[in-house]
């Protein structure tokens, strides 16, 4: 059964409903593996500093682990933690047999080089899917641990039942976390992919021809409703808090809904899927470490 709710215009791709279904399956698999091997999948979560948004994300990840039967090991470090100390902790966790996944919550403080930290994580424990090895595997069409947000976006697109082969897909945003791995995911699925970014010219013309738009620029309301091709699929990765406390995305939702066939809401679209794919990656890493696959 697809996670699609119908409005008077576009159909809503319900990330909360899909995530709930998937987490049931992930939890069942984790329980079966735990009984077989005598331990739960283990995820180490490292938080450096006290950034409020990061604290919220880390709490959500811990809660997700508990509900899915994954052991969560928290390492909360002060903001003045040195890069050397953090690298030492990662080395310990790389060698710890009860840890299957390592997640360093980004952003880290400015005196720490995030690329150095990501590359220090054992690729087999890189459940965020950020390590160059894992991105390279995806580029080579041999995916291992996949970047969580793009992987979650692909699961949402699958809910539409649309065959991606030859589809015109436009990604707005070229970050290492979303835009670039999203392009690789869509290429793997047989789509024709255009990646736009801050140097791109004529953003509107790119979006107007897209069968699928993935908005991940981090700019509120950047994608206008009138730009959307009739029948397009809109995946909105952006999230912004308004003065009244409500949340919105990179896409002008109400206007875009008049043209789109499917659209993700903000909140309740991509967000729940990101943590779900983190849990799925942790179980996958557990299976790999135990020789299950």
Image (cartoon, helix red, strand yellow):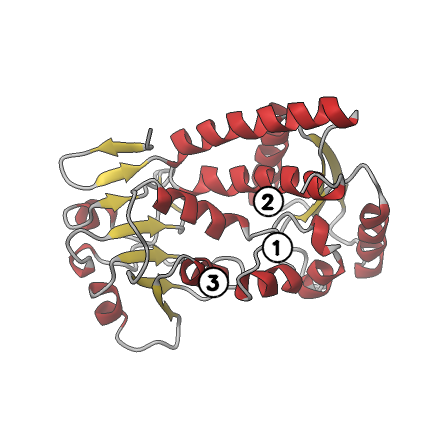
User: What numbered label is drawn on residue 44?
Assistant: none
Residue picked out by circle 3? 184
Secondary element under disc 2, as helix, strand or loop, is: helix
Give the mark nearest the N terminus, 3 or 1. Answer: 1
Tag 3 and tag 1, C-beta contact below 8 Å? no
Decide which of 108, 203 is in the foreground and name it. Answer: 203
Q: Is residue 255 left or right of residue 19?
A: left
Decide which of 165, 270 is in the foreground and name it. Answer: 165
Q: Which residue is painted at 73% across and 21% down in the image?
A: 35
Q: Is residue 279 left or right of residue 151?
A: right
Count the marks: how many? Answer: 3
Decide which of 15, 281 is in the foreground and name it. Answer: 281
Decide which of 73, 138 is in the foreground and name it. Answer: 138
User: What numbered label is drawn on residue 107?
Assistant: 1
Q: Where does the image place residue 280, in percent across and percent down from the top left?
A: 58, 38
Please state, as top left, top right, bottom left or bottom right, where the N terminus lies in the image: top left
- In which quadrant of the rendered view does residue 32 lie? top right
Q: Where does the image place residue 119, in percent across and percent down from the top left?
A: 71, 62
Please state, as top left, top right, bottom left or bottom right, where the C terminus lies in the image: top right
**Residue 174 visible to an observer of this rendering:** yes
- How much space separates mark 1 and mark 2, taking CA atoms? 8 Å
């Amino acid at each position: 059964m697809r996670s699609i709710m119908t409005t008077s215009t576009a159909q809503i791709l319900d990330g909360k409903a899909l995530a709930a279904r998937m987490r049931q399956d992930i939890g069942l698999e984790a329980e079966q593996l735990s009984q077989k091997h005598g331990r739960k999948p283990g995820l180490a979560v490292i938080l450096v500093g006290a950034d409020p948004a990061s604290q919220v994300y880390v709490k959500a990840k811990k809660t997700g682990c508990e509900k899915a039967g994954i052991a969560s090991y928290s390492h909360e470090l002060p903001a003045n933690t040195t890069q050397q100390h953090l690298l030492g902790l990662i080395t310990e966790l790389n060698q710890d047999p009860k840890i299957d996944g390592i997640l360093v919550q980004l952003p880290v403080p400015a005196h720490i080089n995030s690329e150095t930290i990501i590359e220090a994580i054992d690729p087999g424990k890189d459940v965020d899917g950020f390590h160059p090895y894992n991105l390279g595997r995806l580029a080579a069409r041999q995916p291992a641990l996949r970047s969580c947000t793009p992987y979650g976006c692909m699961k949402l697109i699958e809910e539409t039942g649309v065959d991606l082969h030859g589809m015109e897909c436009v990604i707005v945003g070229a970050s290492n976390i979303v835009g670039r791995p999203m392009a690789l995911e869509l290429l793997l699925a047989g789509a024709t992919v255009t990646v736009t970014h801050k140097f791109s010219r004529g953003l509107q013309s790119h979006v107007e021809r897209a069968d699928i738009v993935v908005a991940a620029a981090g700019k509120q309301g950047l994608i206008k409703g009138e730009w959307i091709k009739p029948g397009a699929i809109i995946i909105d990765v952006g999230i912004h808090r308004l003065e009244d406390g409500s949340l919105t995305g990179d896409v002008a939702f109400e206007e875009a809904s008049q043209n789109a066939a499917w659209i993700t809401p903000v909140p309740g679209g991509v967000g729940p899927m990101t943590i779900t794919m983190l849990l799925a990656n942790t179980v996958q890493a557990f299976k790999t470490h135990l020789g299950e696959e």
